[in-house]
Protein backbone atom coordinates (compact mmCIF):
# COMPACT_ATOMS: atom_id res chain seq x y z
CA UNK A 1 0.00 0.00 0.00
CA UNK A 2 1.22 3.56 -0.62
CA UNK A 3 2.78 5.53 2.24
CA UNK A 4 0.24 7.40 4.33
CA UNK A 5 -2.48 4.73 4.40
CA UNK A 6 -1.52 3.69 7.93
CA UNK A 7 -0.84 0.06 7.02
CA UNK A 8 1.36 -1.58 9.67
CA UNK A 9 4.89 -2.61 8.65
CA UNK A 10 4.71 -5.94 10.49
CA UNK A 11 2.93 -9.10 9.48
CA UNK A 12 1.12 -9.15 12.81
CA UNK A 13 -2.66 -9.16 12.41
CA UNK A 14 -2.69 -10.26 8.77
CA UNK A 15 -5.66 -12.23 7.48
CA UNK A 16 -5.62 -15.97 6.79
CA UNK A 17 -6.55 -17.13 3.30
CA UNK A 18 -9.09 -19.54 4.84
CA UNK A 19 -11.09 -16.53 6.12
CA UNK A 20 -11.03 -14.92 2.67
CA UNK A 21 -11.96 -18.16 0.93
CA UNK A 22 -14.91 -18.64 3.32
CA UNK A 23 -16.28 -15.29 2.11
CA UNK A 24 -15.73 -16.25 -1.52
CA UNK A 25 -17.63 -19.51 -0.95
CA UNK A 26 -20.51 -17.84 0.88
CA UNK A 27 -20.97 -14.75 -1.29
CA UNK A 28 -24.18 -14.72 -3.35
CA UNK A 29 -23.03 -11.96 -5.70
CA UNK A 30 -19.70 -11.05 -7.26
CA UNK A 31 -18.52 -8.23 -9.52
CA UNK A 32 -16.31 -9.14 -12.48
CA UNK A 33 -14.22 -6.49 -14.25
CA UNK A 34 -12.90 -7.12 -17.76
CA UNK A 35 -11.36 -4.91 -20.44
CA UNK A 36 -13.09 -4.03 -23.73
CA UNK A 37 -11.21 -4.11 -27.03
CA UNK A 38 -10.83 -0.31 -26.95
CA UNK A 39 -9.35 -0.42 -23.40
CA UNK A 40 -12.45 0.75 -21.53
CA UNK A 41 -13.39 -1.24 -18.43
CA UNK A 42 -16.51 -3.38 -18.27
CA UNK A 43 -17.95 -4.49 -14.92
CA UNK A 44 -20.78 -6.98 -14.55
CA UNK A 45 -22.45 -8.66 -11.57
CA UNK A 46 -22.17 -12.46 -11.61
CA UNK A 47 -23.68 -15.40 -9.84
CA UNK A 48 -21.24 -18.22 -9.32
CA UNK A 49 -19.59 -20.66 -6.95
CA UNK A 50 -16.12 -20.85 -5.43
CA UNK A 51 -15.09 -24.52 -5.64
CA UNK A 52 -11.59 -26.02 -5.52
CA UNK A 53 -9.92 -22.62 -5.24
CA UNK A 54 -11.53 -21.20 -8.37
CA UNK A 55 -14.68 -19.26 -9.29
CA UNK A 56 -17.06 -21.08 -11.63
CA UNK A 57 -19.82 -19.16 -13.39
CA UNK A 58 -22.03 -19.25 -16.46
CA UNK A 59 -21.39 -16.95 -19.40
CA UNK A 60 -22.63 -17.32 -22.96
CA UNK A 61 -19.95 -16.65 -25.59
CA UNK A 62 -22.06 -13.73 -26.89
CA UNK A 63 -22.00 -11.73 -23.63
CA UNK A 64 -19.77 -8.66 -23.49
CA UNK A 65 -17.63 -9.95 -20.64
CA UNK A 66 -16.96 -13.34 -22.28
CA UNK A 67 -16.09 -11.63 -25.60
CA UNK A 68 -13.74 -9.35 -23.64
CA UNK A 69 -12.13 -12.37 -21.96
CA UNK A 70 -11.61 -14.07 -25.33
CA UNK A 71 -9.31 -11.15 -26.25
CA UNK A 72 -7.78 -10.64 -22.82
CA UNK A 73 -8.41 -13.23 -20.08
CA UNK A 74 -7.06 -10.94 -17.31
CA UNK A 75 -9.86 -9.80 -15.00
CA UNK A 76 -10.70 -8.87 -11.42
CA UNK A 77 -13.32 -10.41 -9.13
CA UNK A 78 -14.66 -8.32 -6.23
CA UNK A 79 -17.17 -9.08 -3.52
CA UNK A 80 -19.95 -6.56 -2.87
CA UNK A 81 -18.70 -5.35 0.50
CA UNK A 82 -16.38 -2.34 0.23
CA UNK A 83 -15.76 -2.02 3.96
CA UNK A 84 -14.61 -5.61 4.36
CA UNK A 85 -13.12 -5.97 0.90
CA UNK A 86 -12.04 -9.03 -1.05
CA UNK A 87 -10.48 -8.23 -4.45
CA UNK A 88 -9.02 -11.08 -6.50
CA UNK A 89 -7.05 -10.68 -9.75
CA UNK A 90 -6.75 -13.57 -12.14
CA UNK A 91 -7.77 -14.96 -15.49
CA UNK A 92 -11.09 -16.30 -16.79
CA UNK A 93 -11.43 -18.79 -19.61
CA UNK A 94 -14.15 -21.09 -20.93
CA UNK A 95 -14.02 -24.26 -18.84
CA UNK A 96 -13.81 -27.76 -20.21
CA UNK A 97 -16.89 -29.85 -19.43
CA UNK A 98 -16.48 -30.56 -15.71
CA UNK A 99 -17.37 -34.26 -15.77
CA UNK A 100 -19.66 -36.12 -13.38
CA UNK A 101 -17.86 -35.50 -10.06
CA UNK A 102 -17.07 -31.81 -10.45
CA UNK A 103 -20.38 -31.19 -12.25
CA UNK A 104 -22.24 -32.64 -9.26
CA UNK A 105 -20.28 -30.51 -6.78
CA UNK A 106 -20.87 -27.36 -8.85
CA UNK A 107 -24.60 -28.14 -9.11
CA UNK A 108 -24.89 -28.65 -5.34
CA UNK A 109 -23.05 -25.39 -4.65
CA UNK A 110 -25.22 -23.47 -7.14
CA UNK A 111 -28.43 -24.94 -5.72
CA UNK A 112 -27.45 -24.04 -2.16
CA UNK A 113 -27.07 -20.38 -3.17
CA UNK A 114 -29.58 -19.81 -5.94
CA UNK A 115 -32.38 -22.38 -5.66
CA UNK A 116 -34.68 -19.82 -4.03
CA UNK A 117 -33.92 -17.43 -6.89
CA UNK A 118 -34.95 -20.01 -9.50
CA UNK A 119 -31.55 -21.29 -10.60
CA UNK A 120 -30.68 -24.90 -9.91
CA UNK A 121 -28.53 -26.46 -12.67
CA UNK A 122 -28.31 -30.22 -13.04
CA UNK A 123 -24.90 -31.90 -12.65
CA UNK A 124 -24.74 -32.45 -16.43
CA UNK A 125 -25.74 -28.84 -17.30
CA UNK A 126 -22.26 -28.16 -18.70
CA UNK A 127 -21.84 -31.43 -20.65
CA UNK A 128 -22.46 -32.22 -24.30
CA UNK A 129 -24.11 -30.36 -27.20
CA UNK A 130 -26.15 -27.34 -26.23
CA UNK A 131 -24.55 -27.23 -22.77
CA UNK A 132 -24.33 -23.96 -20.88
CA UNK A 133 -21.23 -21.81 -21.13
CA UNK A 134 -19.22 -22.63 -18.03
CA UNK A 135 -16.37 -20.19 -17.36
CA UNK A 136 -13.66 -20.58 -14.73
CA UNK A 137 -11.73 -17.82 -12.97
CA UNK A 138 -8.29 -18.76 -11.65
CA UNK A 139 -6.76 -16.39 -9.08
CA UNK A 140 -3.23 -14.98 -9.37
CA UNK A 141 -3.24 -12.37 -6.57
CA UNK A 142 -5.68 -11.03 -4.00
CA UNK A 143 -5.90 -8.20 -1.53
CA UNK A 144 -8.35 -8.12 1.35
CA UNK A 145 -9.14 -6.31 4.57
CA UNK A 146 -11.80 -6.65 7.23
CA UNK A 147 -10.56 -3.71 9.36
CA UNK A 148 -8.70 -1.24 7.15
CA UNK A 149 -5.83 -0.43 7.52
CA UNK A 150 -4.82 -2.78 10.35
CA UNK A 151 -5.26 -6.10 8.52
CA UNK A 152 -4.67 -5.33 4.82
CA UNK A 153 -3.27 -8.56 3.41
CA UNK A 154 -1.99 -9.47 -0.05
CA UNK A 155 -2.01 -13.05 -1.33
CA UNK A 156 -0.15 -14.59 -4.28
CA UNK A 157 -1.09 -17.89 -5.89
CA UNK A 158 1.21 -20.33 -7.65
CA UNK A 159 0.81 -20.50 -11.45
Image (cartoon, helix red, strand yellow):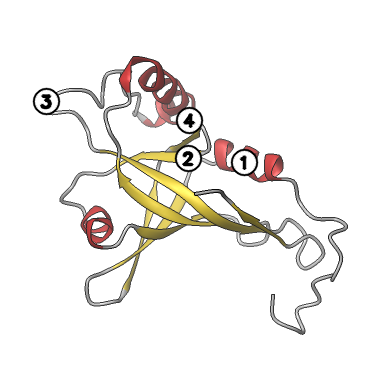
Residue 125 visible in this rendered orientation of the protein? yes
Q: Nearer the viewer, mark 3 or mark 4?
A: 3
- The picture places residue 57, in percent across and down from the top left corner, at 36, 40
Inter-mark Cα distance, 1 to 3: 33 Å
Determine whether, in the image, residue 24 is placed left or right of residue 152.
Answer: left
Work out how far the residue at label 4 is from the one at label 1, CA to CA, in angstroms.
16 Å
* Residue at 65% in and 45% down: 20
* Upstream in sequence: badge 3 or badge 2: 2
Numbered mark located on residue 113 in the image:
4
Q: Would residue 116 be found to the left or right of residue 68 on screen?
A: right
Circle 2 sits on which residue?
Answer: 54
User: Residue 84: where, in percent of width, then height?
Assistant: 68, 56
Q: Nearer the viewer, residue 141 or 88?
A: 141
- Pointer 2 or 1: first along the chain: 1
Asked which quadrant contains residue 148, the reply is bottom right
Q: How many marks?
A: 4
Of the two numbered discs 4 and 2 in the rendering, the one whose residue sits closer to the viewer = 2
Q: Looking at the image, is 125 positioned above or below residue 76?
A: above
Q: CA distance from mark 2 to mark 1?
A: 10 Å
The quarter of the rendered structure image containing the N terminus is bottom right
**First along the sequence among labels 4 and 2:** 2
Q: Residue furthest bottom?
A: 4
Q: Secondary structure at mark 4?
A: helix
Q: Looking at the image, tell me whether mark 1 or mark 3 is earlier in sequence order.
A: 1
Where residue 129 is drawn, which disc sits there?
3
Q: Is residue 85 visible?
A: no
- Report how far apart the C-alphas of labels 3 and 4 lie in the structure: 26 Å
Q: Earlier in the sequence, mark 3 or mark 4?
A: 4
What residue is at 59 percent from the left and 57 percent from the top?
142
Amino acid sequence: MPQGYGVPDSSEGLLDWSDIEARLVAAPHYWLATTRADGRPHVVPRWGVWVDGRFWYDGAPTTVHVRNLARNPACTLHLEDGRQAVIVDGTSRPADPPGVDLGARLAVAYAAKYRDLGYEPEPDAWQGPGAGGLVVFTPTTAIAWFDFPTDVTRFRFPP
